[in-house]
Image (tube, rainbow, N blue to C red):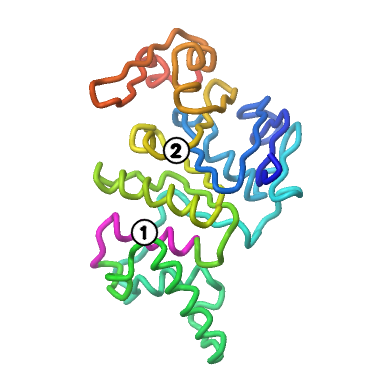
Amino acid sequence: MSDSTVVARDLAVGYGARPTWSGADFELGAGEFVAVLGPNGAGKSTLLRAVLGLLPPLAGDLRVLGGPPRRGNPAIGYVPQHRELDTSIALTGRDVVGLGVDGHRWGARLAGTARRQVRKSVDEAVAAVGATAYVDRRVGNLSGGELQRLLLAQSLVRDPRILLLDEPLSNLDMRNQSAIAGLVSRIARERNVTVLLVEHDVNPLLPVVDRVIYVAGGSVAIGTPDEVVQPATLSRLYGTPVEVLRDSRGRIFVVGLEAEASHPHA
């Protein structure tokens, strides 16, 4: 791809000298929405850590925006898993989003011009996620879906080229899962941002995701949902026969992983 933002060639990542997975080859393009799927402990979040420059490759090559991954890259927005906010502090949604501009200055007063620029950036990010109506409420008075939108705005406030989201749909009901998935898809296309979203369940993402990266059994497969979430590919990744069923609403169910769920990667 001429507009590739993340390129992996025979990539292996892991902790210590032991790879969590290896042999990954893929290119991600600007404006592409990619879901990272797989069981617990397979190495989904490990991929995000590698892109963030927190985990060097054990083998192969990884290029992010044309160069090696580096820590603190302002061109990457990131929403970590299980982001906790102290609801007893008088913190508003606007404060939360503003931390994405210059979080290390929290508590310090910015000069007038800088303050106006921060407010403009925050307002634009809040509008992009549709949170204008409640951005000035205290975080303790926000629903899970509202707070997730504000955390997404925080990751967008510096206008990134890559957006990494680690299980942003967890702890949301089905309606909010679908709403956040659709919102992320729209942001990817309108802002031409590459999105990598880690999730366990592909179903809320099926209507909007472009491709999936499936991580299991120490290997990686990438393609459209129909290409990857199917018996032959999953059976190869897991090393055991797997069935993929669809119900009348088009939802996908993977059958045959009872042993994997009880003893992951035994």
Residue for badge 1 = 149
Percent from the top left, x then y, of residue 223?
A: 54, 27
Amino acid at pointer 1:
Arg
Percent from the top left, x then y, of residue 173?
A: 24, 44
Direction bottom: furthest residue = 112
Vertical side of 217 occupied by 44: above or below: below
Amino acid at pointer 2:
Val
Q: Which residue occupies the foreground of this view, 119 or 55? A: 119
Q: Residue at x 46, y 64 (%)?
A: 154
- Secondary structure, mark 1, is helix
User: Nearer the N terminus, badge 2 or badge 1?
Assistant: 1
Number of residues whose C-alpha sits closer than 10 Å to that of mark 1, classed few (under 14), some (14–19) or many (20 or more): many
Measure how far apart labels 2 and 1 are at the Cα level.
Answer: 18 Å
Vertical side of 44 occupied by 52: above or below: below
Residue 93 shown left or right of residue 34 in the figure: left
Percent from the top left, x then y, of residue 63?
A: 72, 44
Q: Which residue occupies the foreground of this view, 16 or 211? A: 211
